Amino acid sequence: MQTEKQLIVKGITAGYKNKTILSKLDTPPFSVGKLTVLTGPNAAGKSTLLRVLAGLLKAEGETLFNGENMLNMTPKKRAEILSFMPQSVPTDIQLSVIEAVISALKASPLDATSSQNNEGVVHRAMAILKRIGIDHLALENLSQLSGGQRQMASLARTMVRNPEILLLDEPTSALDLRHQIKVMKLARSFADDGRIVIMVLHDLNLALRWADEVLVMNKGQIISQGTPTQAITSQVIADIYGISARVEKCQKGMPHLMIDDEIIEDF
């Protein structure tokens, strides 16, 4: 019987210049088929952790996938396993959407990708654009798109290589409500395909509705973890945000965060 693949993070220490952000951080295992959300206030270490996993930030410790420490992998080997979508998308890329997606595919070190003919590459690029719902933008220049459209194009570039691990850093930040739901449904479907999906989100209601697991971070540590309603509680919100809030079920039975007021401390 084959053991289910997991991503295990052990004793991660990382930061920027002379400032340590994560110190000997352990996380619960990230599992195939699960959508895990990292949330918490600004400067909590969420994006730092994602950048460590992506191999974009040096760190001490272990990020074990299939028994191998990804921190020790070559960029080529790591690119065979995961894709990372950053927070911000460049605005000055003079390529059409499909050219940008094809360039991401051709830049892949995967032998199977590099051996495809041009027709196969275009077909694969168009397939991911269609799945994401922006195939009608295929010939549009990236620099002429709205912020939300560029975000969706960035998601297409991230997914075109069919990664086993998908890392998304605030993928809904530039999107309107409709496209936020679209991205969350896509992330859910990517996990259902048999991937590990890890996403940074600030919107706690999106996390409550769509995540399988939530890790609430603050000051480089995990404060709370579990299912969305286990991890996001009134006490956790009060402790790390200084906000009085309630998690209640809506008429459809879905959990929803209700904000009451900020907590004013007496000095």
Image (cartoon, grey):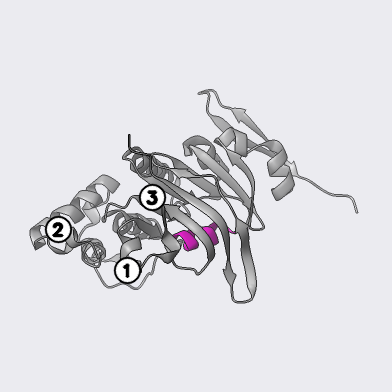
Q: Are marks 3 and 2 in contact (CB under 8 Å)?
A: no
Q: Give the class, few, some or many, for how many residues have Cα within 10 Å of label 1's Cα (few <14, many ≥20).
A: some
88 shown above or below 155: below
* Residue 173 located left or right of residue 44: left
Q: Amino acid at mark 3?
A: Asn
Q: Amino acid under label 2? A: Val
Q: Earlier in the sequence, mark 1 or mark 2?
A: 2
State how far apart marks 1 and 2 are (Cα): 21 Å
For the residue labelled by badge 2, is the local secondary structure a helix, a strand or a loop? helix
The answer to which quarter of the image holds residue 214 is top right
Q: Quadrant of residue 256?
A: top right
Q: Report the magenta residues as a range.
A: 44-53
Q: How many marks?
A: 3
As measured in the structure, the alpha-carbon distance from the residue carrying label 1 to the one carrying label 3 is 39 Å
Magenta stretch encompasses residue 119: no
Q: In front here: 44 or 221?
A: 221
Provide the residue designation for mark 1: 143
Can you name the residue that lies furthest to the right here?
Answer: 267
Q: Residue at x 57, y 49 (%)?
A: 39
Please determine whether, in this image, residue 21 is positioned above or below residue 197. below
Residue 27 or residue 209, whichever sits in front: 27
Q: Which residue is mark 2?
A: 122
Q: Mark 2: few, some, or many residues within 10 Å (few <14, many ≥20)? A: some
- Badge number at residue 66: 3
Q: Amino acid at mark 1?
A: Ser
**Viewer-nearest residue: 206 or 143:** 206
- Tell me if I can see residue 88 in this picture: no
Q: Is residue 95 left or right of residue 228?
A: left
Which is closer to the viewer, label 3 or label 2?
3
Residue 45 within the magenta-colored segment of the rendering = yes
- Judging from the image, what secondary structure is the residue with disc 1 in? helix
